[in-house]
Image (cartoon, helix red, strand yellow):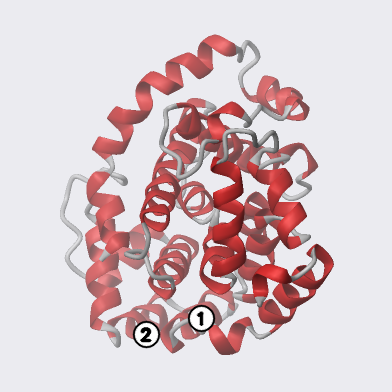
Amino acid sequence: MEGKLRPEQAREQILEILSRTTDILTLPHVVHEILDVTSGKNSSAVDLTNIIESDPALTTRILSIANSSYYGFVKKISTISHAVVILGFQEIQNIALSMSVVQLFDRRGSEFTERLWRHCFAVGVGSRMLAGYLNLKLDGKFFVGGLLHDIGKIFLSQYLPEKFNDLLWVMEEDDNKMNYHALEEEYFGISHAEVGGRLLDSWMFPQDISDAVTFHHDPARSRTDPAFASCVHLADLICTVKGISPLKEHYFLTIDKGILPTLHGLKEDFATEDMVKLLSQLDLEIDRQSSFVSAFKR
């Protein structure tokens, strides 16, 4: 039945599902407790430590991430209290939120789903690589923004599978002249970027992460942190050009030229040569961050 919906009907159905996100896609109670503590003015490191330690699985994953090469700490972090002090409230919050979102969705479904998650993890690594290359202050938000940039596609593929599969079938046809983004608007009346942003808003994600997801295809429109959105945008492009993509998008994705002032403000001579250099670095960076990525996949 869903495959017969007109775009405006599909959009209404999607928005209706999204309005019930907190009921049908519920983040673990411990995550809500973490959000309460990290947003509280009088909260202490002890408060956050106690909440995390009440969830053994989350404790294990956070310690695994804290000790990964992603952070590069010389001494082993063996306790949550130490991790909270070293990483900080915001970083712990970002880790817990993104881990929980990944766990909500089935990552072992179709070949497309598995390729999409591979792309998402690669864009997470690539976003952080871009941030470092542009001399931005590194923190977990860059990986999280990249990791979740296509969460809207994952939502559409799992909650309107018939219509989404029709879209994929049309896209693979030899005589198809429309790119994925145009087909998405025609089939759903809404973009995966908007869906993703609405999802993260409903889960109370930090605004800069939600904004980066919403505008990852047109980062020049970002009003919260255009540099962050630009990193996700460029990482998405680099991964797609390298073939780390579930779709044949390398024929269609183009750089948003509106971000050039932002890029040149960060690195005055940023040009095509920089993109080529970053393309060559991506595989090495993905390999270097493999232990960090693995912690999210558990």
Amino acid type, mark 2 = Ile
Q: Residue at x 73, y 81 (%)?
A: 16
Position of residue 84 measured from the top left corner of the image (x, y, whole percent): 36, 67
- Residues 251 and 50: in front is 251
Q: Residue 60: x percent and y percent?
A: 22, 71
Q: CA distance from mark 2 to mark 1?
A: 9 Å
Q: Foreground residue, 61 or 89? A: 61
Which quadrant of the rendered structure holds the C terminus? Answer: bottom left
User: Quick one: SS at disc 2?
Assistant: helix
Q: Which mark is residue 51?
A: 2
**Mark 2 or 1 closer to N-term?**
1
Horizontal side of 179 relative to 76 (left or right) equals right
Return the x and y of residue 284 as percentages of the image width and height: 28, 28
Pick whichever, 104 or 167, lies toward us: 167
Using the image as rendered, state which of residue 147 and residue 262 is in the foreground.
147
Which residue type carries mark 1? Answer: Val
CB within 8 Å, label 2 to label 1: yes
Please tell me which residue is depicted at 53% across the width and 38% down the height of the picture: 236
The residue that mark 1 highlights is 37
